[in-house]
């Protein structure tokens, strides 16, 4: 009896190690690709604003928890499939079944792994990832808006804030063809053939030479001023949380306090989808030890379609009712198609 229990425990440990190994392997691949795509986007900022590469690399690290919450369901799909396909190919599944233990070790290991993944995912998705992503958004904003004009070779209509646009060229480290559009109580356009631009005391400072300024008031009256020398100072505009943050920066407590029940439903459904993917894999592949190409393609394509549909709904203007209803419909369709597939195979 003790020998049987020890053997069962060893099998469970072995299966858990195998599932975890493939999960981490796929996690590394997916996370690397996602991180590279994000850092490529950030490097466009670096090239344009001449931000230090190290600052960009450090900034990109704050994206990792948020990326993990997005790709975990996809990792599960491929991790489980690759793990058990290899076990099947090496006849290890058949060997375990031949011991007379049935599917119980597989069920237990999937349940254990599911509980661990959901626990970590819930902690990440509900609190840790939003907190770290909030830091990312703040640091990204600071990098975008803490400008060193001396390092910028051209501006290409740079938005300094919500009301100010700057464009200029640089020739021999001299600012030329400077164009500034800004709003105060009037709509203003300033052009200068050359000048100096720098940031100081929470202000953008422009010392302009040989140009003109056009102001348009609310009555469409136009005022034009030509100048040889002109000094313009524009204050930094502090951006509030609503402008910098988005739904990905809200923890479960923020959502509850702000009564953002839609965002809460998104996060809860993400957990449900993880459970569904594991159950789907067990019923479609593992239960009957079916790992033919047609079964694998059906499993992968069905799960990915559900996940993509979920992401589309989350990024659209929707309500709790519409989101929940549509997600249950798509899952119901998946379950019905799975039953039809089983009946077809029996016949």
Image (cartoon, helix red, strand yellow):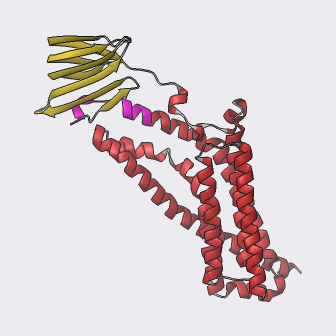
Task: Answer yes or no: is residue 116 visible.
Answer: no
At horizontal 60% and vertical 53% (from top left) the residue drawn is 311
Q: Where is residue 251 drawn, in percent x and y? A: 65, 38
200 in the magenta segment: no
Query: Which of the 4 image quarters holds residue 346?
Result: bottom right
Query: Which of the 4 image quarters holds residue 164?
Result: top left
Q: Above or below — where is 222 with respect to 161?
A: above
At horizontal 18% and vertical 33% (from top left) the residue drawn is 169
Total labels: the figure holds 0
Give the main secondary structure of the magenta stretch. Answer: helix
Q: Is residue 99 left or right of residue 269?
A: right
Q: Is residue 179 left or right of residue 40?
A: left
Q: Where is residue 347 drawn, in percent x and y? A: 78, 89
Name the residue furthest right. 1
In the foreground, 180 or 249: 180
In the foreground, 106 or 221: 221
Task: Answer yes or no: is residue 171 visible.
Answer: yes
Q: Where is residue 152 drawn, in percent x and y? A: 24, 35
Q: Above or below — where is 344 with respect to 313?
A: below
Q: Which residues are magenta?
A: 140-154
At horizontal 54% and vertical 41% (from top left) the residue drawn is 133
Q: Where is residue 182 drawn, in percent x and y? A: 33, 20
Q: Quadrant of the N terminus?
A: bottom right
143 in the magenta segment: yes
In the foreground, 265 or 3: 265
Name the residue furthest left. 172
At horizontal 37% and vertical 41% (from top left) the residue drawn is 55
């Amino acid at each position: 009896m003790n020998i049987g229990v020890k053997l069962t425990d060893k099998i469970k440990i072995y299966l858990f190690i195998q599932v975890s190994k493939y999960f981490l392997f796929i996690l590394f691949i997916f996370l690397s690709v996602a991180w590279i795509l994000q850092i490529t986007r950030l490097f466009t900022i670096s090239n344009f604003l001449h931000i230090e590469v190290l600052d960009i690399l450090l900034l990109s690290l704050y994206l990792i928890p948020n990326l993990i919450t997005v790709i975990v369901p996809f990792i599960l799909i491929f991790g489980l499939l690759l793990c058990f396909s290899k076990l099947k190919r090496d006849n290890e599944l058949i060997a375990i079944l031949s011991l007379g233990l049935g599917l119980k070790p597989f069920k237990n290991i999937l349940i254990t792994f599911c509980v661990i993944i959901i626990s970590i995912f819930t902690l990440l998705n509900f609190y840790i990832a939003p907190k770290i992503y909030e830091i990312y958004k703040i640091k990204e904003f600071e990098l975008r808006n803490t400008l060193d004009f001396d390092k910028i070779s051209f501006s290409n209509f740079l938005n300094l804030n919500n009301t100010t646009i700057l464009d200029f060229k640089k020739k021999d480290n001299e600012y030329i063809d400077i164009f500034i559009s800004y709003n105060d109580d009037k709509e203003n356009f300033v052009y200068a053939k050359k000048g100096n631009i720098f940031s100081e005391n929470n202000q953008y400072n422009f010392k302009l030479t040989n140009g003109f300024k056009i102001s348009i008031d609310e009555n469409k009256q136009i005022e034009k001023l030509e100048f040889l020398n002109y000094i313009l100072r524009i204050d930094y505009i502090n951006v509030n949380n609503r402008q910098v943050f988005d739904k990905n920066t809200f923890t479960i407590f923020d959502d509850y306090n702000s009564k953002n029940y839609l965002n809460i439903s998104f996060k809860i459904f993400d957990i449900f989808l993880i459970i569904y993917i594991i159950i789907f894999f067990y019923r479609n592949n593992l239960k009957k030890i079916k790992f033919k190409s047609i079964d694998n393609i059906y499993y992968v394509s069905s799960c990915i379609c559900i996940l993509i549909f979920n992401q589309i709904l989350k990024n659209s203007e929707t309500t709790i009712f519409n989101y929940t209803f549509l997600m249950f419909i798509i899952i119901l369709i998946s379950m019905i198609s799975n039953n039809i597939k089983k009946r077809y195979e029996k016949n």
